[in-house]
Amino acid sequence: MSKSRELLDGKLLGAGALIAGLTMIAIADQASAQYYCDERFQDCDRRPPPPPLPFPFGLFQPREAAPPPPQPEPRQLPLRPDNMERPVDPALARQYASLYAPASGEPFAVPAVRLSDIDPQYLRKRVNVQTDEAPGTIIINAQNRFLYFVEGGGRAIRYGVGVGRQGFGWSGVAAVKNKQEWPDWYPPKEMIARQAELRRQLSELQSGLGMPGGPRNPLGARAMYLWQGNKDTLYRIHGTFEPWTIGQNVSSGCIRMINQDVIDLYERVPLGAKVVVLPARS
């Protein structure tokens, strides 16, 4: 009797589940017909279907990733002015082909100089001079944009330079206190204040806020640091990757040279060398 009762109860439960399932299907079909009725059914309700719920229920909806923090832009070198190209005498090109060829043995590329970018008078040349300064002295004629390395015997090597623009010139007597290859650049706070765009090109280096040495560094391949006694004048003799600026008043007071020229001068100048910067006449 008990076994028959269990069988009957099981049949009843199965029948109940079947009825419930059929009821749910019927309700679903009714809902489906309610929203997606066919034109053949004239009495159907053509209400639009409800908007879909986010799946699953808004808990795991995709989210846009936060934008990455802005990265400092590398310093962009000024474009070479197209209107500065000059015709180059073939004999001059042969004479200077080796002096201004790509520099070898450097940690960064120093490309060959386009001689058409530079007035020929500012190319390296050995000249006669009259001076009482001892051999090894550097004399800078800011008015004519020349740097002389005195060799003695009335001879000197003359290099073309770029000098400080109006309001940034400097003159006096100093000494080469330090020399560095591919130096880091630490612009003075005053320069950063004047040129706010510099800030995004700088990073924290060993000695403060600056730019590491390399092909985008404004000090170029070499730098010689000018001091007066125990005081840094903040003026430098340094290279540049903008050779078309040689012979112009373009810097913030420093003396810039073609990279090949500053490499040559760097090898000749000892620490402690005297530097005479002549005043530029207004």
Image (cartoon, rainbow, N blue to C red):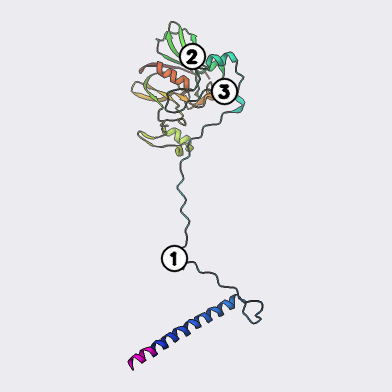
Position of the N terminus, as image quadrant, is bottom left
Q: Which mark is residue 117?
A: 3
Q: Nearer the viewer, residue 227 or 70?
A: 70
Q: Return the x and y of residue 88 as percentages of the image width and height.
A: 60, 18
Q: Tell me the mark number nearer the camera, choosing from 2 and 1.
A: 1
The residue beneath circle 2 is 158
Residue at the image point whose x is 46% and y is 53% from the top: 66
Q: Tell me the mark number nearer the camera, choosing from 3 and 1.
A: 1
Q: Return the x and y of residue 111 as percentages of the image width and height.
A: 50, 25
**For residue 199, which quarter of the picture?**
top left
Q: Type of residue at label 3? A: Asp
Q: Tell me the mark number nearer the camera, choosing from 2 and 3.
A: 3
Residue at the image point whose x is 46% and y is 45% from the top: 70
The residue beneath circle 1 is 59
Determine whether label 3 and label 1 are within 8 Å by CB.
no
Mark 2 burial class by Cα count in 10 Å: few <14, some 14-19, many 20+:
many
Instruction: State the CA–CA distance, disc 3 to disc 1.
Output: 65 Å
Q: Type of residue at label 2? A: Arg
- In the displayed structure, 207 sits above or below 261; it is below
Mark 3 burial class by Cα count in 10 Å: few <14, some 14-19, many 20+:
many
Q: Is residue 244 magenta?
A: no
Q: Main secondary structure of the magenta part?
A: helix
Mark 3 falls on what kind of element? helix
Residue at the image point whose x is 44% and y is 63% from the top: 60
Magenta region? 1-7
**For residue 222, which quarter of the picture?**
top left
Q: Nearer the viewer, residue 88 or 28?
A: 28
The mark nearer the N terminus, 3 or 1, is 1
**For residue 151, which quarter of the picture?**
top left
The mark nearer the N terminus, 2 or 3, is 3
Q: Can the viewer see residue 165 in this picture?
A: no
